[in-house]
Amino acid sequence: MAALAVVRDLREHWAPASAEELERFETDVLSGFVLARASAGLADGTIRGDVGHLDQIRSWFGRPLWDMEPADADVYFGKVLRHSPSGTRLGRSQALSTYFMFLELRHKVELHRMTGRVVECPIDEMNRPRGAKDAQLRIPPSEPEIGTLFTGWGGELATCRKFAPTARNYTASKLMSQVGLRVSEACGLDLDDIKWDLGRFGKLHVRHGKGARGSGPRERMVPLINGADRTLRWFIEDVWGQFDDDHTRPGAPLFPSERKNTDGSARRVGDDALRNGLDNAVEAHLPGWTDKLTPHVLRHFCASHLYGKGLDLLAIQEVLGHSWIATTMRYIHVQQTRVEDAWVAGMERAAKRLEGLAR
């Protein structure tokens, strides 16, 4: 009968590393984590978000994250983040879980050799934050309210102190309401991205659309419907030249900044300028929506407005650049009337039944 082998705990054999070695190793591991996530195709913003979460946890913990135990995670998520938004808690726990998965796959043996620890994620089924990310029901302004905003804003152009930047902010917000551009997409547009010869109205080549689940930029062609073609023609013919005098320059931004490059050409506007322009206009011309009407709410207005005008869901999905039709449905659900229609139809059926009984 064969003798049973002696099973030894993996923690018994290790050579402790110095504090300097561990510090360098921790930096190298994080760099490797970033590179691995980039090679998986995640967008830079997604990676920055995960690293930011890890940095917040590391600052609180005060030691390398591989030293965390479930009890530490209990304290952090149960006390420190107890009253934080659920989206923050979920994002932070997901980043920590992904980081420990990376440690286990890539550095388990090396970590044991240096620290004597066996990698084990401190997030488990007992302390994993539950729930979904905080959702906010975005009910956009009505069509008359949006009309009031842009009528007042347009009238302001005749008397404002700085015509060009005010007209630029007005045009960018108008496009958000007409074809659902994201503010980041508007900032990333070049003059060359307007393709006047495509389709019946012309199209915008949106090169920096948001990808699904951090997949990176997702391009799309946006038709200049809903008056967007007239908005852009006016801006280019009457306003753009006040920022820059070279329409043919490669990479010339559609929405320029007042600041100049070293060669004298206009820089690209930042999203803060467009957001601030909208905030100021809302406060002046639609004060009931102050601090509530954002670029993203204008995007919701666009979806609801197009749906109300008879555009089908698939067409709206294409305009907005959504990967999933379910996302588009969340944008226009406040305009859908299937419950009301079912109620009316039910009442009509009930009335007919009663009518038959009365006879």
Image: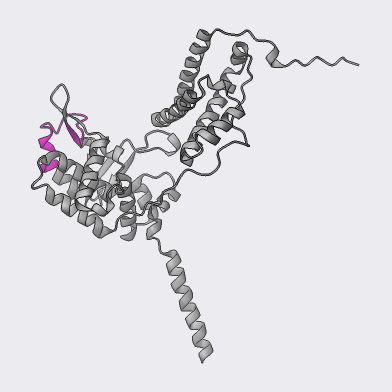
Instruction: Name the foreground residue: 251 vs 295.
Output: 295
Q: Main secondary structure of the magenta part?
A: loop
Picture quadrant where residue 273 is located: top left
239 in magenta: yes
Residue 126 horizontal/vertical position (percent):
63, 37
Q: Residue at x 50, y 16 (%)?
A: 26
Q: Is residue 332 left or right of residue 96?
A: left
Residue 284 horizontal/vertical position (percent):
19, 50
Question: Residue pushed farthest bottom?
Answer: 359
Instruction: Name the foreground residue: 203 vs 304.
Output: 304
| Residue 196 visible in the shown view | no
Q: What's the magenta region?
A: 236-258
Picture quadrant where residue 275 is located: top left
Marks counted in the figure total 0
Question: Residue pushed farthest front?
Answer: 79
Instruction: Name the foreground residue: 135 vs 47.
Output: 135
Q: Is residue 193 left or right of residue 33?
A: left
